[in-house]
Image (cartoon, grey):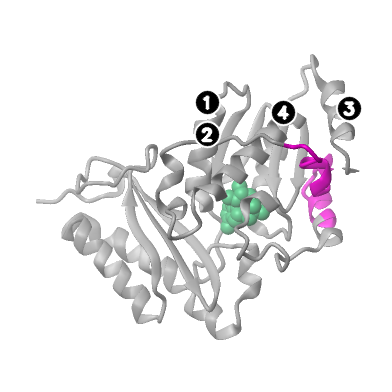
């Protein structure tokens, strides 16, 4: 496994693979790897001849009051996990390499970035602009055939897929299922911030989503969402949002059992912002009478 620190080193690898039949996969991460990341690396390893993992805590996607400085980091551990998962190249540039003096470009997706986490009262669309700007740069620096993202960040994956299509990137965006702890809490680097009691309470996020899924077919969407919110509040967790959306457009979902819906939640647990979601497919919904 090779560690590349400079954009120029990444470009040299990219250029050496260009025009060859080698299939390249990219897994973008901010490090502090867990099994969710590993599932993406393993999927990339299975489908691709060369696997590139980027490791970059992207300052542009943090708000000034967010945890950029505290974001958990452990490069040596990440390198060991990546190597075990069969990564060929870790691209771990410095912020100055990604955003050199004079950097002046932003890649902004409209609409999809203005709801859920993009709502101004929560993280705001600037967060997603930071994501799409850096992912565009990574897609150009690596030029992968496939790039792998987690369903855990469903809105992010939707925004990136939109951007890749709109800007005619040749890379296919692959979205893979959320990996969970035993009690259902979605794995996240930020879970490391939680105290033991908060960690226990946080499992109510997944229980609330499951409850909504279970109640939706018979009780209807509003009642199912209300029950999910109630479940969270009973665990002392006040959600920022707990909403049903159409998975592709992120428009508000109506009460239509023939349509897939994405129920997405963000909640502050003891000062740590956690997000999760469940995709409810039409064929998993028992027909209402
Ligand atoms: P991050 O390092 O948090 O920016 O995440 C890097 C990638 O891993 C993103 O595509 C995330 O959606 C994905 N990811 C994070 N947590 C999980 C999880 N629990 N299961 C699957 N993918 C995940």
Give the Cα distance between marks 4 and 3.
Answer: 12 Å
Does the Cβ of the disc 1 residue fall within 8 Å of ligand 1?
Answer: no
Number of the label disc, if any, that sits on residue 140:
4
Could you tell which of marks 4 and 2 lies nearer the N-terminus? 4
Which residues, given as a range, are shown in magenta?
79-103
**Mark 2 Cα within 10 Å, few/some/many (few <14, many 20+)?**
many
Q: Based on the picture, tell me whether residue 286 belongs to the magenta stretch.
A: no
* Residue that protrudes farthest toward the top in the picture: 19
Left or right placement of residue 167 versus residue 69 in this view? left
Could you tell which of marks 1 and 4 lies nearer the N-terminus? 4
Residue at 76% over, 43% down: 53
Q: Residue 170 is drawn in which quadrant?
A: top right
Could you tell which of marks 3 and 1 lies nearer the N-terminus? 3
* Residue that protrudes farthest toward the front in the picture: 102
x and y percentages locating residue 81 in the rendered image = 79, 56
**Mark 3 Cα within 10 Å, few/some/many (few <14, many 20+)?**
few
Q: In terms of secondary structure, where does tag 4 sit?
A: helix
Give the Cα distance between marks 2 and 1.
Answer: 6 Å
Q: Which residue is identified by label 1?
A: 165
Q: Are the residues at dot 2 and dot 1 in contact (C-beta closer than 8 Å)? A: yes
Residue at 65% over, 63% down: 189
Residue at 83% over, 42% down: 97
Give the Cα distance between marks 4 and 2.
Answer: 15 Å
Q: Which residue is identified by label 2?
A: 161
Left or right placement of residue 271 versus residue 9 in this view? left
Point out the image quarter for the N terminus.
top right
Number of the label disc, if any, that sits on residue 12:
3
Rendered view: 220 above or below 238: above
Could you tell which of marks 4 and 3 lies nearer the N-terminus? 3
Give the Cα distance between marks 1 and 4.
Answer: 14 Å
x and y percentages locating residue 103 in the rendered image = 74, 37
């Amino acid at each position: 496994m090779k560690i590349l620190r400079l954009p120029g080193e990444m470009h040299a690898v990219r250029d050496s693979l260009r025009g060859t039949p080698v299939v390249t996969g990219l897994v973008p991460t901010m490090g502090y790897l867990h099994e969710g990341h590993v599932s993406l690396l393993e999927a990339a390893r299975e489908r691709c001849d060369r696997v590139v993992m980027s490791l970059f805590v992207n300052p542009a996607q943090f708000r000034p009051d967010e945890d950029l400085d505290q974001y958990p980091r452990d490069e040596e551990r990440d390198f060991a996990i990546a190597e075990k998962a069969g990564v060929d190249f870790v691209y771990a540039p410095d912020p100055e390499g990604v955003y050199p003096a004079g950097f002046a470009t932003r890649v902004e997706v409209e609409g999809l970035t203005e709801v859920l986490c993009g709502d101004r009262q929560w993280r705001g669309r600037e967060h997603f602009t930071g994501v799409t700007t850096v992912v565009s740069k990574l897609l150009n620096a690596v030029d992968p055939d496939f790039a792998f993202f987690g369903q855990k960040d469903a809105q992010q994956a939707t925004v990136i897929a939109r951007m890749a299509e709109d800007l005619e990137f040749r890379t296919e965006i692959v979205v893979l299922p959320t990996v969970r702890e035993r009690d259902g809490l979605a794995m996240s680097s930020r879970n490391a911030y939680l105290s033991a009691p908060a960690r226990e309470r946080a499992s109510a996020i997944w229980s609330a989503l499951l409850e909504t899924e279970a109640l939706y077919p018979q009780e209807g969407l509003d009642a199912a969402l209300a029950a999910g919110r109630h479940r969270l509040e009973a665990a002392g967790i006040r959600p920022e949002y707990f909403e049903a959306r159409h998975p592709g457009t992120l428009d508000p979902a109506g009460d239509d059992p023939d349509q897939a819906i994405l129920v997405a939640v963000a909640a502050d647990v003891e000062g740590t912002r956690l997000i999760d979601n469940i995709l409810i497919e039409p064929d998993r919904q028992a027909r209402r009478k």
